[in-house]
Image (cartoon, rainbow, N blue to C red):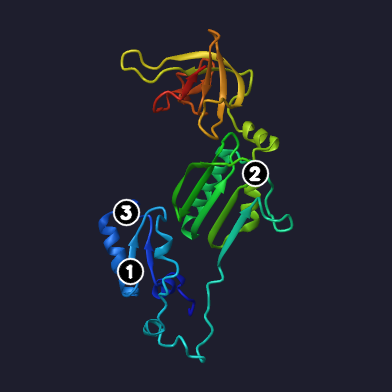
Amino acid sequence: EGVVNEAVAQAAFADRLLLNKTDLVTEADLARIEARLRGINAFAPIRRCSRGDVSVDSVLNIHGFDLQRALQTNPQLLNPENAPTQHDKTVTSVSLDQGAPRHMRTVQKGDLDFELATDFLEYIAESQGEDIYRMKGVLAVAHSQQKYIYHAVHMTFSGGFEEAWQPGEPRESKMVFIGKGLDEQFLASTFNNCLATPENLTRKASTLRFKPGDAVECRTTGFDAEEGERWAAGTVVEVLHRADDMAPGEVAPYRVRLEDGSELTVLTDEGSEIVGANSHGDEDGEEAGEGCEAQAA
């Protein structure tokens, strides 16, 4: 249709080719990709790397552009009669930046709830992964002194808590999406729904199966071949519970006081870990669980 294949064009005119994320594929995959790149550009050296770890000196001030080589790649490069280059107008980028000037900012300020934010990113990757060429960002997450840094290509996602926020550094989240058919208004409004505001957290709590005061039973041990699972009766005393010894950004759905006076932090709202009173033998309670998800106080 006359639309430029941007990836091929950039590889063809490159002076250096960085083959990143090499730790995620096999040697056979790398050999196949390198052969494909050499077929597009036989002159540019290919450097394998992981997480973009390359020396600045190897990519800047290398004076690599060669007009004659460029003309071999595209003999019509200097022809003034060439038709204007056409780009795919469905490919756009969207930036959600809490630090942007007020008149340009499309999102509200504030820390993000980690579960809501990761659910948002997972939804985008799963529902639009084929059309998302790249996602990356730095998130300010409630209950974390570290930045959550992530990047994704289509449905391949990588992220984690890394460097700490420095004293005086604004806790501001930034997200960038590159892909086809991006809906900026949807992305911005969904981002705002992930903020750790009282309204959003109240809505999140309303999706839980139990409320404070509800009688429940909690699984207190893993499965034992002789004794089976052990469950204990108790009462929900808090929802969306946070303790200092929990992982960065983590918030437990329940804090439960057992009949013996001890308390448990229940880390997942699943029938394999917590059920209504006198029902742990029902279908919900028989769901398989991998290890105990409750922590004793």
Which one is closest to the eye, mark 2 or mark 3?
3
Q: Position of residue 182 (x, y in %)?
A: 58, 60
Dot 3 or dot 1, earlier in sequence:
3
SS for callout 2: loop
Q: Label 2 to label 3, Cα distance in Å?
A: 35 Å
SS for callout 3: loop
Kind of residue indicated by mark 3? Val
Task: Check the image and name the residue furthest to the right.
Answer: 103
The relative height of residue 158 versus residue 266 in the rendered view (above or below) is below
Label pair 2/1, CB-CB below 8 angstroms: no
Q: Position of residue 84 (x, y in %)?
A: 54, 84
Q: Residues within 10 Å of mark 2 (few under 14, many from 20)?
A: many
* Nearer to us in this view, 88 or 8: 8
Q: Which residue is mark 3?
A: 25
- Residue at point 52%, 25% (across, down): 245
Q: Does the image show residue 65? A: yes
Q: Position of residue 258 (x, y in %)?
A: 54, 12
